Image (cartoon, rainbow, N blue to C red):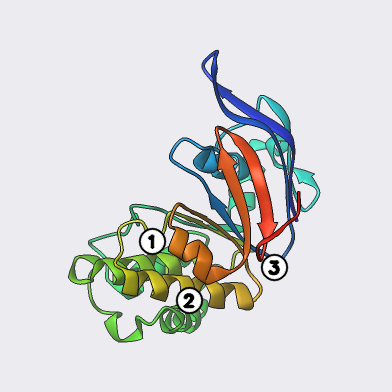
Amino acid sequence: MITFEHVSKTYHSDNVSIHDVDLTIKKGEFITIVGHSGAGKTSLIKLLLAEQKPNEGTVLFDGVDIHRLRKSDVPHYRQRIGVIFQDYKLLNGRTVYENVAFAMEMIGKSNEDIEHDVPNALELVGLEDKKDRFPTELSGGEQQRLAIARAIINQPDVLIADEPTDSLDPENVKAVVQILKKINELGTTVILATHNKDVVHDLNKRVIVMEKGTIIKDQSNDTKQH
């Protein structure tokens, strides 16, 4: 589904962020990308979102080189990828329900679809009873769950979660991880970037370890793959 072929990305003349990365992610897989700050996790995500272009190599999504897409086709491509941001990016002037509905309105979904899908998404993340609250009335964990509901409402093929548990307490961390696992079980490919070792351990999924822009380990359920 997703393939990085000898991908390198250099910032300025000597600051290499990604170096000769080879990575294949299969449809329906759940992978965790770990590494210290500056290891290259965020750069990998930006390349996948076609926000940046590699200096060398190719990024393929379903066999298509995403960096050769026409500019007009990039928004449609990005609709296939849901993103959970570190700072949530919620709309504080809109209710929980309206935050999720807005993501559907942006791509022209009908009111009928919105009325059907939004309650289901809120139920999935356990916020159905908070639909009329505003983001500022929610706890940090609830805000993160709202961000997840908004990211999945248009049924993306891939969900990217960039440090989604970074500012949460252990109880909320577990709740978010369980939701991500449930989303994956429903068929969505999940890519989780984190430095939380407890999250990695609890998931027991394939782990990609990055260091200084390269993949130094790729292991599945503690079995090294290379």
Distance from the alpha carbon under mark 2 to that under mark 3: 16 Å
Q: Quadrant of residue 215?
A: top right
* Residue under the point 30% across and 58% down: 167
> Which mark is nearer the camera, 1 or 3?
1
Tag 3 residue: 28
Q: Which mark is residue 178?
A: 2
User: Is disc 3 placed on a helix, strand or loop?
Assistant: loop
Q: Which mark is residue 65?
A: none
* Residue under the point 42% across and 78% down: 125
Residue type at the position of mark 2: Gln
Residue type at the position of mark 1: Thr
- Is residue 188 rendered to the left or right of residue 141? right
Distance from the alpha carbon under mark 2 to that under mark 1: 12 Å
* Residue under the point 50% across and 71% down: 202
Q: Nearer the viewer, residue 80 or 203?
A: 203
User: Is disc 2 placed on a helix, strand or loop?
Assistant: helix
Q: Earlier in the sequence, mark 2 or mark 3?
A: 3
Tag 1 residue: 165
Q: Quadrant of residue 183?
A: bottom right
Q: Quadrant of residue 14?
A: top right
Would you call the spot at circle 3 few (<14 residues within 10 Å), some (14-19), or many (20 or more)?
some
Residue type at the position of mark 3: Gly
* Residue under the point 41% across and 73% down: 174
The answer to whether one can see residue 109 in this image is: no
- Is residue 178 rendered to the left or right of residue 166? right
